[in-house]
Amino acid sequence: MPDFELTEEQLEIKRAVREFCEKEFKPEIALECDREEKFPMDLYKKAAELGFTSIYLPEEYGGGGYGLLEMCLVIEEMCRADSTLGMAITAGTFASDLIVQYGTEEQKEKYLPPLCRGEYISAGAFTEPARGSDLASRLDTKAIKYGDEWVINGTKIFITNAPIANFIITLCQTDLKVRPPYRGQSLFIVDRDTPGLEVTPLHNKMGIRASPTGEVAYNDVRVPESQLLGELNKGFYHTIWFFNASRVAVAAQALGMAQGAFEIAFKYAKEREAFGAPIIQWQGISFMLVDAATRLEAARLLTYKAAWLVDQGKPDPMISAMAKNLATRAAVEITDDAIQILGGYGYMGEYHVERRHRDAKITEIYEGTREIEKLTILRFLLKRM
């Protein structure tokens, strides 16, 4: 990787997103969406009109035609402005890159243009109640072929966007005998209005309350052969490809919300006086800020490198896992430090750091827990050293 410096075009993307957020991300909207667990649909559609939500989707379907790095810049900037709104909006097209990479032309024509216009929201259903992050085991959600249809039965849990998604990309066990079982998994695109598909919203989450989460039940859900996404029995491999990129996007989420919290805390520390001086002059405060700035810089460079490798066609699962592991832990700790620096004010919702802390925690859990990331890193270290 060369000396990292964003191009003028990439810097312009950051500036455009920041300008949008400064205009549209109102504090009262964020607080309302968090309190009422409400998806910011109007903001999502405005962001889609400007091309921010589909910046990585192909131009021929209405997207921006950029890469993962540019998408990470959008995510980082939106989550820097506000973690609640930023995470909800940038996750609106979640898992749709699987259609870009593995979909048929008919599937691309059907699903990608509405996504680009902000008319559709997508979801990806991988996690199961008894499996968690372990996708290599035999899945409980099964798809059995009858004639020219597949019949799906099973349950998925903690599915982002499920209550509002127009379609859900679902990982199923299609070969019940193969060993190891991950060699018999396949992906299907299941439309929201398919009979037998039931979505139950999950409430009272610690954070990301504007990003709806649900449990998805498949009760004799019938989908035609045309809804198979990618190759039959290659769904696990397709999903791992997706996670190599999506984990970098989660690192960008964490990076953005940590940066935003750092900026709030830094400004407060320069203005707040105690014992006759701004509190930034006291080492107990200043060292927290210095450490935060250092960790942010390290996490940013690693995240950008992981995204750049994906864009070069050389995705590195170890680097992606490292980026997510570093950035997400930094986000949890930096947002916690921001609360500490603001003291009692940090504990109040109006100062927007306690919400960032609540939102940050999920980045250590979804798309693979920190422990799963460490196992991934170790596996590749053992191979390479």
Image (spheres, rainbow, N blue to C red):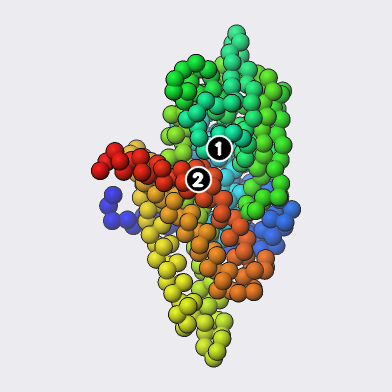
CA gap, disc 2 and disc 1: 9 Å
Q: Is residue 10 left or right of residue 263?
A: left
Task: Measuring from the top left, give residue 137's x and y in whole percent.
Answer: 50, 28
| Marking on residue 132 | 1
The reply to whether callout 2 and callout 1 are in contact (CB within 8 Å) is yes
| Marking on residue 369 | 2
Above or below, comparing residue 252 to residue 96 in the picture? below
User: Which quadrant of the figure contains the C terminus?
Assistant: top left
Dot 2 lies on which element? loop
* Residue type, mark 2 in image: Thr
Residue drawn 66% across the image and 33% down it:
216
Q: Is residue 158 left or right of residue 51?
A: right
Dot 1 lies on which element? loop
Task: Measuring from the top left, give residue 9's x and y in whole percent.
Answer: 41, 53
Task: Measuring from the top left, give residue 12's x and y in whole percent.
Answer: 45, 56
* Residue type, mark 1 in image: Gly
Name the residue at the bottom extreme. 276
Name the residue at the left extreme. 385
| Marking on residue 119 | none
**Label 2, residues with CA under 10 Å away: few <14, some 14-19, many ≥20:** some
